[in-house]
Image (cartoon, rainbow, N blue to C red):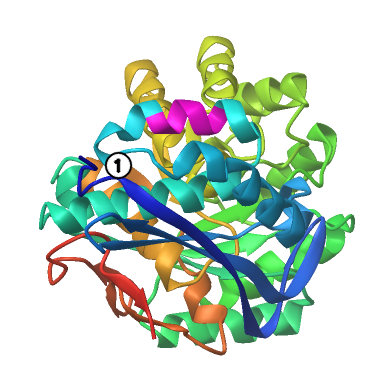
Amino acid sequence: MTAPTTIRALGVETLDIPLFAPFGISGGAQDVARSLLVTVELADGTLGYGEAAPFPAFNGETQASARAAVELARPVIEGADVREWRTLAAALRDAIGAAGSARCAIETAVLDALTKRAQMPLYVFFGGAGRSLETDMTITTGNAEQASRAALAILARGITAIKVKIGAGDLQLDLARLAAIHAVAPDSPLILDGNGGMSADAAMELMAALHAQGVRPALLEQPVPGDDWAGMGRLARGGGVPLAADESASSAANVLRIACERAAQVVNIKLMKAGVVEALDIAAICRAAQLRLMIGGMVESTLAMTMSAHFAAGQGGFAFVDLDTPMFMAENPFEGGFRQTGACLDLRHISAGHGVRPR
């Protein structure tokens, strides 16, 4: 007899969501979130939903490559039992490897279906440590005047922590933008995110110039390329501010290397990089190595961002929260998810699963 928790079908469809303005990082910009909606249907009719949000400028993944990976995973997923979610995740990793956004979408849908049947919210499944978080908001690429206006708009939303994309190749522009932001938001913690677009020398020069101006960022995130281990180590030892690994922290194996080499003080966990289950392993390594935790994402809708909120709130201990991209989207094709008031993302009203469903 087929168990009611057996996956009867795996579905995938295009999920294109326009943005209010292009979301720019050092490697490029995106004007539409080109994602995928993944659905698993259980034998008893329960539906679980997941989102794949590839960001080509971040790691080269595309909507087409993510869809191909989901289709490749179909023989692994259909007929499997969601109660065996860790075994399923291992088989998925073997089948589609580094296709992180596809792994994230499928694992999210699997865990959503599992916890819906159990009438358990995912923040409880992940540990129940908390039910809410406070997010920052990002200022993407642009000039100093645009950065100043964006900072004021963020403060007007009731959000104080500001993340700033840097590293487009013009150090003086970065300095001018950061000075403009600091002038209108002098009390806001600043997270500077280079997305691997700088050299270690340029990052050190920027930190020295900011120090001279009396600006001390709360965090410097991945200024150098993900494979520049020497540069990360140098900045972790002498950059003058805590260093976060993002592109360098693309897998549990890489995070173990970060811990062994002390190549960062903080690790930005993004479920889209390696999937939900490997992210659990990454968080465990960080805690054992006393690396501070950050939760972030790609350009993701309410669905994926709510899943990340469950992950971080449920486990607790996340010092930095960057779950802001739904605020950049001109449309919301979903119902439910976290409730946002200012910087606060509240999950306590969700009674089962991640609480997000298509309209």
Other-residue count near label 1 (Cα within 10 Å), few / some / many at <14 / 14–19 / ≥20: many
Q: Quadrant of the C terminus?
A: bottom left
Q: Is residue 323 left or right of residue 196?
A: left
Question: Is residue 321 in view?
Answer: no
| Numbered range of the magenta stretch | 88-93
Residue at mark 1: 82
Question: Is residue 322 in view?
Answer: yes
Give the camera-side residue of 194 and 125: 125
Q: Does residue 91 belong to the magenta stretch?
A: yes
Give the camera-side residue of 345 and 116: 116
Q: Is residue 80 left or right of residue 70?
A: left
Taking the spot 54% from the left edge, 54% from the top edge, the residue there is 191
Taking the spot 39% from the left edge, 75% from the top edge, the residue there is 159
Give the answer, above or below, for where 232 lies relative to 140: above
Taking the spot 55% from the left edge, 30% from the top edge, the residue there is 93
Give the answer, above or below, for where 163 lies relative to 71: below
Give the camera-side residue of 136 and 182: 136
Q: Amino acid at mark 1?
A: Val
The image position of residue 17, as x and y in percent, is: 61, 81
- Element type where label 1 sits in the image: helix
Q: Quadrant of residue 236?
A: top right
Q: Quadrant of residue 308?
A: bottom left
The image position of residue 251, as x and y in percent, is: 57, 28
